[in-house]
Image (cartoon, rainbow, N blue to C red):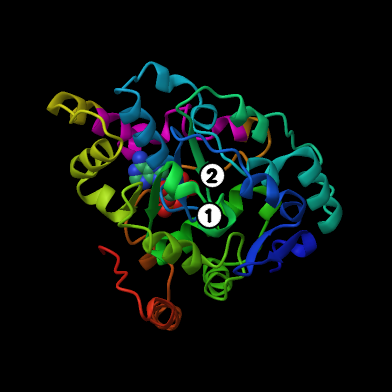
């Protein structure tokens, strides 16, 4: 992949494409010390993870909007953050890709696993790793909320994320990037293994499978689902409307606790562009030509064969 150069590696099982540093670090996540009260929020990147993290945290914390002013990345830390952004991993990326211009990137803001170890229970933890890379007893021991999104929108959103992140610098057009996406040649690929492994767990009592599209189309119903799943008392009408306002795209985009502006300030993300970007269903229609769209449809067809997985839209 031209944007990644040699700083990335295929890992087994599943041919997962990760930063080279992950090779050194995967056991930290696979052997991560779980607690029964932990709640994990999992997804393939760009599926609405940040939005879901905020919903889960707020519902679990009885709509504590004051408490939600603390940075989301501290309230719901990213398990493998340092694989993507510590000094060591950054150095390794930069050496590997012989890029010097990014040497001003600061890694002070990156979450280390010992930060998560030290958090009091209940902990809320985000990861994009497929289930096979997480502790094998995860679903039997903890609660897991998984969010999935139509892969066409995920691919477009992942492209724009690459423009934001100096480490993943790419000069590709959206269409060129999407071709890499459907060849499983982007970070965290393959998309379908991540998704289908989760889909197969959807009936486990400790597992809640959400679709981004459902969150967009009927947020109150999905908030109640999350609430029931977490074993909380049903949300009141007032709580639902307060949550809906807080979680509304336009408000979310300017909310400094969730919009990753601290990463832009730290130089970890570029200053132009927004992490909370557009928030729509079907943005892919603005970028896909007919040929790419039918290629993408064939890929979906092939990869979902033998499953009953269907996206709401
Ligand atoms: P777009 O790039 O299509 O806008 P993740 O958090 O997994 O990285 O997902 C990011 C995607 O979720 C982005 O999609 C982002 O705009 C969207 N998103 C974030 N907050 C949202 C919100 N409050 N409502 C709808 N979409 C949201």
Q: How many marks?
A: 2
Q: Residue at x 54, y 69 (%)?
A: 181
**Residue 140 picture location, percent across and down:** 43, 48
In-front residue for pair 27/67: 27
Please state the extent of the stretch shown in magenta in the rendering: 243-263
Report, in whole angstroms, how far the alpha carbon at label 1 lies from the one at label 2.
8 Å
Q: Which mark is residue 136?
A: none
Q: Residue at x 69, y 49 (%)?
A: 27
Q: Which mark is residue 160?
A: 1
**Residue 93 picture location, percent across and down:** 79, 52
Quarter that holds the C terminus: bottom left
For label 2, the crowd category at 10 Å Cα-Cα, with few meaning under 14, some 14 to 19 and many 20 or more, is: some
> Answer yes or no: do the residues labelled 1 and 2 have beta carbons within 8 Å?
yes
The answer to whether one can see residue 277 in this image is no
- In this rendering, the answer to whether 36 lies above or below 183 is above
Q: Which mark is residue 273?
A: 2
For label 1, the crowd category at 10 Å Cα-Cα, with few meaning under 14, some 14 to 19 and many 20 or more, is: some
82 displayed left or right of 138: right
> Can you tell which of label 1 and label 2 is closer to the viewer?
1
Q: Main secondary structure of the magenta part?
A: helix
């Amino acid at each position: 992949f031209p944007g990644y150069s040699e700083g990335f590696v295929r890992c087994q099982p599943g041919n997962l494409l990760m930063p080279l540093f992950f090779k050194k670090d995967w056991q930290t996540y696979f052997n991560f010390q779980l607690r029964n009260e932990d709640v994990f929020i999992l997804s393939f990147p760009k599926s609405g993870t940040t939005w879901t993290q905020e919903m889960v945290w707020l519902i679990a914390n009885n709509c504590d909007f004051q408490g939600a002013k603390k940075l989301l990345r501290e309230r719901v830390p990213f398990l493998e953050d340092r694989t993507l952004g510590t000094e060591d991993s950054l150095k390794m990326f930069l050496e590997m890709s012989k890029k010097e211009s990014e040497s001003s990137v600061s890694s002070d803001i990156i979450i280390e696993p010992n930060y998560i170890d030290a958090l009091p229970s209940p902990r809320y933890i985000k990861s994009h790793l497929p289930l096979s890379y997480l502790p094998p007893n995860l679903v039997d021991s903890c609660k897991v909320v998984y969010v999935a999104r139509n892969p066409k929108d995920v691919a477009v959103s992942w492209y724009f994320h690459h423009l934001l992140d100096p480490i993943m610098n790419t000069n590709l057009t959206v269409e060129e990037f999407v071709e890499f996406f459907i060849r499983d040649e982007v970070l965290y690929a393959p998309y379908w293994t991540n998704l289908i492994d989760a889909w197969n767990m959807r009936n486990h009592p400790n597992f809640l499978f959400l679709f981004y599209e459902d969150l967009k189309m009927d947020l109150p119903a999905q908030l109640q689902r999350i609430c029931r799943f977490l074993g909380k008392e049903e949300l009141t009408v007032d709580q639902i409307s307060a949550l809906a306002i807080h979680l509304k795209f336009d408000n979310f985009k300017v909310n400094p606790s969730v919009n990753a502006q601290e990463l832009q300030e730290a130089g970890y993300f570029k200053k132009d562009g927004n992490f909370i970007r557009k928030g729509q269903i079907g943005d892919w229609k603005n970028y896909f030509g007919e040929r790419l769209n039918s290629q993408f449809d064939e890929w979906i067809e092939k990869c979902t064969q033998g499953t009953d997985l269907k996206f709401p839209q």
